[in-house]
């Protein structure tokens, strides 16, 4: 290490703080390695990392120790061999599909009520590049099977709990169908999180997360991740190195911090959502409540089989009786505690209007086809006191009709 005190000011300004001594202590939390490049005392080692003959870090687009710590944590949660972090959930989905082989002449079969941006990525961007995409009702296993045998897709993609209709994917059955046709099964586990289900242990090949949601958990970060076998993650890393949708170290550190309370938070999200869903079902102003924990949910038995006693998630949807866009807007404006905002998985309760946000890019016909009506509201139930949430919804359900 150079003795900087003998250097000129311009040199000191540039070199001070670089390569600090680690001393004889160990930090208990992984540091934020806010560095875009990494150096080695012996150039041979740097060369070895570039060549892949030894592990290490050379450049942040190829890897970063803080981000690697997050990747290790997510792989551990999902019981996967390896994981790769991305700048957003959408960057993760796009890279995963590219790595699997989505290109002109290939095909993809997808759940029809998948997250709006994923739907549009498939229906417009990838379709325009020559990928044949077919959307199917993921709970109609015969239709999924038929689509897979007709198209021989490279990928079958579904959400373990779908957005915003909260359909449950029968992961073991989908894995069997996908593998019969040599397709890779991708499961977006953002809504359920590994506290409810670990799709890789049930036959899925790749798990995707928008870590923006429950894994981060505090509404202050954007990120994504893919978990899979080491071999698949290696192929994915080649895509990431070229496309560069990397997660930054500060964001990775925030998600790592969020993960530490994930099981605790999820327990409360699930408990609040179940109580609220049961209460909403008794309200006159509500046409129907969609929540996997309710016996009225079409896949309630499947949810019990897949999730055991771990809960049904923190997301619920409901339809305001006879409501159109103006009614929903008034309902949102009369809320005093729940926040009308997009995204989910935050500690506070968020209310979203799918027709105008997550599924805005779909035509009204496409929305109607998959069951997203003009009166549908999606709620990400937070971890507030349940009595306060109930009180807020109760006053808003009364107030919006009189506003
Ligand atoms: N998957 C699901 C189920 C989502 O709800 C979202 C975003 O809402 C995404 C993927 C995309 O994640 P991001 O917004 O982090 O790109």
Image (cartoon, rainbow, N blue to C red):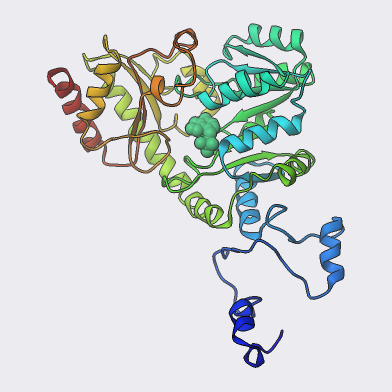
Residue 238 in view here? yes
Q: Residue at x 48, y 34 (%)?
A: 310
The C terminus sits in image quarter: top left
Is residue 281 toward the left or the right of residue 300 in the image?
left
Q: Is residue 286 left or right of residue 248?
A: left
Query: Along the horizontal axis of the image, is 399 left or right of 29?
Result: left
Near-viewer residue (397 or 390):
397
Residue at image coords 56%, 71%: 27
- Position of residue 57 relative to residue 131, above or below, is below
Q: Residue at x 83, y 68 (%)?
A: 45
Q: Position of residue 390 (x, y in %)?
A: 23, 31
Q: Residue furthest bottom?
A: 6
Q: Quadrant of residue 317?
A: top left
Residue 253 percent coordinates (x, y): 53, 56
- Residue at the outermost left position: 402
| Percent of width and height locating residue 201 | 66, 33
Picture quarter with the N terminus: bottom right
Camera-side residue of 294 and 20:
20
Where in the figure is residue 275, as x and y percent of width and height? 31, 29
Asked where in the image residue 380 lies, by quadrant, the reply is top left
- Residue at 63% of width from left, 76% of height from top? 18
Q: Is residue 295 above or below residue 150?
A: below
């Amino acid at each position: 290490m150079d003795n900087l005190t003998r250097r000129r000011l311009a040199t000191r300004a540039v070199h001070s703080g670089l390569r600090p001594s680690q001393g004889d202590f160990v930090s208990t939390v992984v540091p934020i390695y806010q560095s875009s490049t990494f150096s080695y005392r012996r150039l041979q080692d740097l060369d070895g990392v570039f060549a892949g003959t030894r592990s290490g870090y050379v450049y942040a687009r190829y890897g970063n120790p803080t981000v690697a710590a997050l990747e290790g944590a997510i792989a551990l949660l999902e019981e996967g061999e390896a994981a790769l972090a991305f700048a957003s959930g959408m960057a993760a989905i796009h890279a995963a599909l590219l790595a699997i082989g989505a290109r002109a002449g290939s095909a993809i079969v997808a759940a029809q009520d998948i997250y709006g941006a994923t739907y549009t990525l498939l229906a417009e961007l990838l379709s325009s590049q020559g990928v044949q995409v077919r959307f199917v009702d993921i709970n109609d296993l015969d239709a999924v099977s038929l689509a897979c045998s007709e198209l021989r897709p490279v990928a079958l993609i579904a959400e373990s709990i779908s957005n915003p209709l909260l359909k449950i994917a029968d992961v073991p059955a989908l894995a069997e169908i996908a593998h019969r046709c040599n397709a890779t099964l991708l499961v977006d586990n953002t809504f359920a999180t590994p506290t409810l289900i670990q799709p890789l242990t049930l036959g899925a090949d790749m798990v995707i997360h928008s870590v923006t949601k429950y894994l981060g958990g505090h509404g202050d970060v954007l990120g994504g991740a893919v978990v899979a076998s080491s071999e698949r993650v290696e192929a994915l890393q080649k895509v990431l190195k070229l496309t560069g949708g990397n997660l930054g170290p500060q964001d990775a550190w925030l998600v790592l911090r969020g993960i530490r309370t994930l099981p605790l938070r999820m327990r409360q999200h699930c408990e609040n959502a179940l109580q609220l869903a049961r209460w909403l079902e008794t309200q006159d102003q509500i046409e129907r409540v969609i929540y996997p924990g309710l016996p009225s949910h079409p896949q309630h038995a499947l949810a019990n089989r897949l999730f055991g006693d771990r809960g049904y998630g923190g997301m619920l949807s409901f339809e305001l009786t006879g409501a159109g866009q103006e009614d929903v807007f008034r309902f949102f404006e009369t809320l005093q505690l729940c926040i009308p905002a997009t995204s989910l998985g935050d500690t506070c309760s968020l209310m979203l209007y799918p027709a105008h946000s997550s599924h805005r890019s779909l035509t009204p016909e496409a929305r109607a086809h998959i069951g997203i009506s003009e009166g549908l509201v999606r709620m990400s139930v937070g971890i507030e006191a349940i009595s306060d949430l109930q009180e807020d919804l109760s006053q808003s359900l009364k107030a919006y009709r009189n506003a």
